[in-house]
Amino acid sequence: MELTSQEIQLFRHNGFIRFPTQLSKEHVEALKSAALKDIAEGVEPVARQDGRIIRISAVWQRGGIFQETITCNEILNPLESLLGSNIEFVLNRHNHIYLRDAGSTHSLELHRDVGHWSRTIATVLIYLEDTNLENGCTRVVPGSHHLPAFASLNDEKTQQIAANQAIPLPMPAGGLLAIDSMIIHSAGVNRTDRTRMSMTLGYHSPDELTWEDNPRRVLVRGERPYRGNDKPRE
């Protein structure tokens, strides 16, 4: 379940890769059921649009199948090919499940998840329902993570260029898509009368220059090595 050297190079070059692994049908159904239960019961924290819940946040903190998914081998094994053997899960970026319907408007604009290459994370999108052109699959601008840090996406010309180069990425239920969070991307418009549910997770390797544990990060594989030059010599 590791990535090949060619797949790693494609991720570095294009800014995204479909993992060769995917979640089983049973796993997807268990995850959907838990998410829909929390939505029905309004378990906070949630985000609402027009009175209806469109997102449940802090999925790690919900435990159970959510944590099982975040730490599963189907994600961490290929992710290790990109991040190395030490992996942290980020609690304060992503860490949520979206339920998009025809009225959902969040994240439809092209955007970046982070503003600078030195702070980027590996985002893993888990699709809990088939996504396609009709129900608003993810769109990305290949290679756009190489554009200058803090490149403005607010001016009309840049938006038009990005929109003209964006490509859709249909994914099956259980499919796993990893993106460099500097890549320009967006959700698509759901033009159907059905939902489109997905889970968004953020990972990166531990900061080797930070000695203290960060309460907003959870070590999910390996260790937190410290390599600052002020480290006492053994």
Image (cartoon, rainbow, N blue to C red):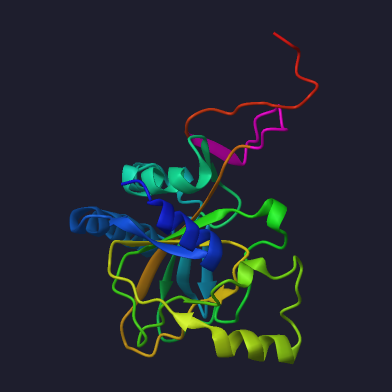
In this rendering, the answer to whether 72 lies above or below 29 is above
Outermost residue toward the right in this view: 230
Name the residue at 66% across, 67% down.
Answer: 146
Is 216 inside the magenta-drawn segment?
yes
Extent of the magenta region: 207-220
Outermost residue toward the left in this view: 26
Name the magenta segment's main secondary structure: loop
Residue 213 image-quadrant placement: top right
Outermost residue toward the top in this view: 234
Name the residue at 69% across, 70% down.
Answer: 147
Is 219 inside the magenta-drawn segment?
yes
**Which residue is at the front of the view, 129 or 164?**
164
Left or right: 130 in relation to 16: left
Relative image position of residue 215 (x, y in whole percent): 63, 36
**Which residue is at the front of the view, 6 or 78?**
6
In this rendering, the answer to whether 104 lies above or below 200 is below
**Which residue is at the front of the view, 137 or 55?**
137
Left or right: 20 in relation to 199: left
Does the rendering let one see residue 207?
yes
Relative image position of residue 82 (x, y in whole percent): 49, 48
Relative image position of residue 185 (x, y in whole percent): 55, 74
Name the residue at 51% across, 62% down.
Answer: 179
Name the residue at 59% across, 29% down.
Answer: 224
Count of numbered tags: 0
Q: Quadrant of the C terminus?
A: top right
Residue 180 image-quadrant placement: bottom right
Does the rendering let one see residue 56?
no
Relative image position of residue 204 (x, y in whole percent): 56, 46
